[in-house]
Image (cartoon, rainbow, N blue to C red):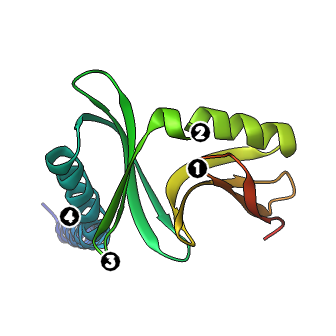
């Protein structure tokens, strides 16, 4: 092998090694950045499964407005649907039968009827000013964002913020 080939292989090895170290570093940062959220979801799921009639969890939510809240929807052994909201900082939890409030699908329908034409609509269940709420966040065609907060029990619009 001549010296140019050896030098090229050495440079290639260094570049690949540096790229591997950078990739590993990014993976470690991502792991530690998402760990608190996954721990919080696991804690909420554990509490719901141990302290409520919920035996199967179908979806998790996270809302952080005036208070951080983690919530989920699940079913009992008898097939009844429940919503569970946990406030990690105050360690308070709330359980609601699905029949006592609006579902995610109903809230999206209410939102689309009142505010048509939005894309990237996301719905989260949580806690806001002492009541359970659904929050719809969306992106408009002009690139701006907005959100609407609905009362969980009645579906009444509580807060509307547009063009953020």
130 versus 143 height, above or below: below
Answer whether residue 72 is visible to the viewer in this image.
yes
Q: Residues within 10 Å of mark 3 (few under 14, many from 20)?
A: few
Q: Badge 4: few (under 14), some or many (20 or more) residues near its Cα, within 10 Å?
A: few
Q: Residue at x 85, y 43 (%)?
A: 114
Residue 111 position (above or below residue 143)? above
* Kind of element beneath mark 3: loop
Residues at circles 3 and 4 in contact by the CB criterion of under 8 Å: no
Q: Residue at label 1?
A: 152
Q: Earlier in the sequence, mark 3 or mark 1?
A: 3
Residue appearing at x 82%, y 64% in the figure: 162
Q: Earlier in the sequence, mark 4 or mark 2?
A: 4
Q: Is residue 146 left or right of residue 90?
A: right
Q: Secondary structure at mark 4?
A: helix
Task: Name the residue tied to disc 2.
Answer: 102
Cβ atoms at labels 2 and 1 below 8 Å apart: yes
| Comes first in the chain, label 3 or label 4 | 4
Displayed quadrant of residue 81: top left
Q: The N terminus lies in which quarter of the figure?
A: bottom left
């Amino acid at each position: 092998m001549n010296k140019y080939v050896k030098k090229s292989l050495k440079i290639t090895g260094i570049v690949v090694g540096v790229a591997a170290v950078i990739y590993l570093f990014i993976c470690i940062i991502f792991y530690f950045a998402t760990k608190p959220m996954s721990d919080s979801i696991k804690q909420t799921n554990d509490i719901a499964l141990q302290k409520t009639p919920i035996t199967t969890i179908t979806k998790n939510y996270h809302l952080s407005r005036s208070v951080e809240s983690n919530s989920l929807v699940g079913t009992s052994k008898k097939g009844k649907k429940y919503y569970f909201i946990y406030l990690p900082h105050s360690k308070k939890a709330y359980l609601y039968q699905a029949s006592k409030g609006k579902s995610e699908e109903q809230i999206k329908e209410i939102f689309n009827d009142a505010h048509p034409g939005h894309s990237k609509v996301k719905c989260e269940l949580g806690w806001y000013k002492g009541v359970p709420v659904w929050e719809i966040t969306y992106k408009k065609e002009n690139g701006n964002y907005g959100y609407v907060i609905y009362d969980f029990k009645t579906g009444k619009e509580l807060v509307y913020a547009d063009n953020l």
